Image (cartoon, rainbow, N blue to C red):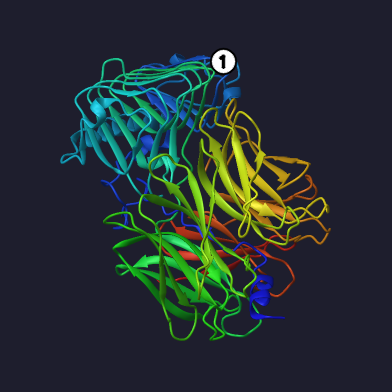
Amino acid sequence: MNTLKRFFMLLIGPTALLLTIAAAWAFSARTAEAAGPPPVNLGTAGKFVILTKTGITNVPTSAITGNIGASPITAAAMDNVTCAEITGSIYGADAAYTGSGVTTCFKGAAADNTLVATAVLDMGTAYADAMGRTAPDFTELYAGDISGQTLVPGLYKWSTGVLISTDVTLSGGPNDIWIFQIAGDITQADASHILLAGGARAQNIFWQVAGGAGVAMGTTAHFEGVILAATGVTLKSGATVNGRLLAQTAVTLIQNTVTRPAAAIPTAVALVGLPDVNGNGTVDMALLRVRAGSIVAEIRDGLSGALLKNSVFFSNAFTPVAAVALPDADGNGVSELAVLTTRNSDGHVAVEIRNVSGADLPRRISYPAGFSPVAMRVVSDADKNGVAELAVLLSRNSDGRGVVSVQNIAGTPNLHYIWSAAGYTVSGLQVVGDSDGNGVPEVAMLSRRTSDGLIMVQVGNAASTINIHMVPFMAGNTAIDFTAVPDKDLNGIPEVAVLSTRNSDGRQVVEIKNAAGAALPSTLWMAPGLTSTQVEAVNDSDNNGVPEVAIRSTRISDDRLQVVVKNAAGLVNPNVIWYSPGFAPGSLTILKDTDLNGTEEAAVVMIRNSDGRTQVEVRNAAGSPVAKHYWFAP
């Protein structure tokens, strides 16, 4: 068996991990790599998805994920939001809330009254902070009409209102910051959308709105970010929000979905599974962080946790976006690690590759200007020359259209481009194997149709004739993440699994379909009370012949991390894994059996709340949930 084949057998579990390295308000330090201004500190107002001074008006049925509150007005001013419509709690200035007669979601004790009153004060402080920022990067841009534009991170200032009549894209990295200072109102047209690209996160987007009318969202419009309004926020029927509505007067809802942003993920941390670096028979791992001004991969033994090597990549002039493990391409018998980055000064996209042991032997790959990086994966020799390829998904800055650049990781590049269909924006990349039976592995792009928001996975050959085929997913849903799944229905065709949120009520589901041919879908609905943000494939941990999907979620009540492992062909024997409390959890990586018991493991980077110390907590995907803890240098 050749080296390339051995490498891919060792790494059956996913080895590429998007670096969701958001610098959220809840953390006291922000990475130097973030573009844009420092974030706005919401204080205790960040505990609420809707917070007002004069109440919430609601025409049912709405779906609200997160806590809501009002003060100093009586809690009766929220009576037409019922407990059935909220996943979270209602906090009031007194005990007057009655709702529909069911008050189990209401918190009106003295301590709760104090909490919401303090949060309203913090809301005012956050508003003043956002309004008081100086030295804007952009002033009076497009005379306030940002319709159809793509906006990069930065501080924006308008002496007028802002108009959104067609889709607007905010393109930047997961820890980049946007602050919009608006002297007038925000007016968003029916069926228009604010879209995020390049890993941008709603929790890092702040809209400070001083106008007398406040914010008005049209029918079925979609909004992203934290609204800090001097007056009110009004949503027309079917409008959706991923963010927070923090209003100095009232919030008006009409059959809307309002979802708090996903919990903050630890700053500048990623975990990548590696093949056996030191020859002791187990897979190893690399923790990627920004330390002492450089991107550092701390490589540790999967069995003992012993430090094997610190490998230094780009300097702090670059921001990491994604990382993958690579097979030995330079013929020295050592596997490699690739890190995808953007240069902070101009957004230039580049990959640096280094050996995971011995001499680094670095080499770099550069990509065209005018694009932002989205994701990176490794392909198992699509052009049959004995060398694996690197697939990098880029989003064109001008219109969000995606293209996958596939090239050999060493030797002649043999460059191959796979464009997404026009009229779509892209947000994710996977390698799905050979779904069309021509012997060539394929890449799959997670995309969204700009005309109506339909989720579409676009699958194309990684070499030779592209042969794009389109796999649609649930209409009326918003995609969160996706993964490639081995053949669950044993028809010889690999599948793709999409995690999405239903816009009408915020319910989350994983939908699995064949990557080609008849869809043969499976649907795995998530339990209420959780916010799910990631899905990964697991290679049959319970030995029933069916692969599984692992879904990373946080419990809304306390942000504790849960990973649930479900069979991809149905809800058979789900394994629910809880992780240690007292930590801020990062992203999920599936490791190939570090404890040699024949079961893959679910590994999560965790930051201890008390002191910021980093650990990787690893638990079996099936059987005993006993944890292994790998502590890393401060």
Q: Nearer the viewer, residue 412 or 253?
A: 412
Which residue appears at 56% of the width and 67% of the height?
A: 389
Residue 502 location (% of width, % of height): 61, 31
Q: Which residue, given by chain and number where applicable, does mark 1 sit on? A: 60
Which residue appears at 24% of the width and 32% of the height?
A: 141
- Is 429 placed above or below 385 here? above
Q: Secondary structure at mark 1?
A: loop
- Is 558 placed above or below 103 here? below
Q: From where the camera sits, is residue 551 visible?
A: no
Q: Nearer the viewer, residue 76 or 434?
A: 434
Q: From where the camera sits, is residue 517 visible?
A: yes
Q: Amino acid at mark 1?
A: Pro
Residue 258 location (% of width, % of height): 49, 28
Residue 301 location (% of width, % of height): 56, 78
Q: Quadrant of the image for the N terminus? A: bottom right
Q: Residues within 10 Å of mark 1 (few under 14, many from 20)?
A: some
Say left or right for 504 vs 439: left
Q: Nearer the viewer, residue 530 or 186?
A: 186
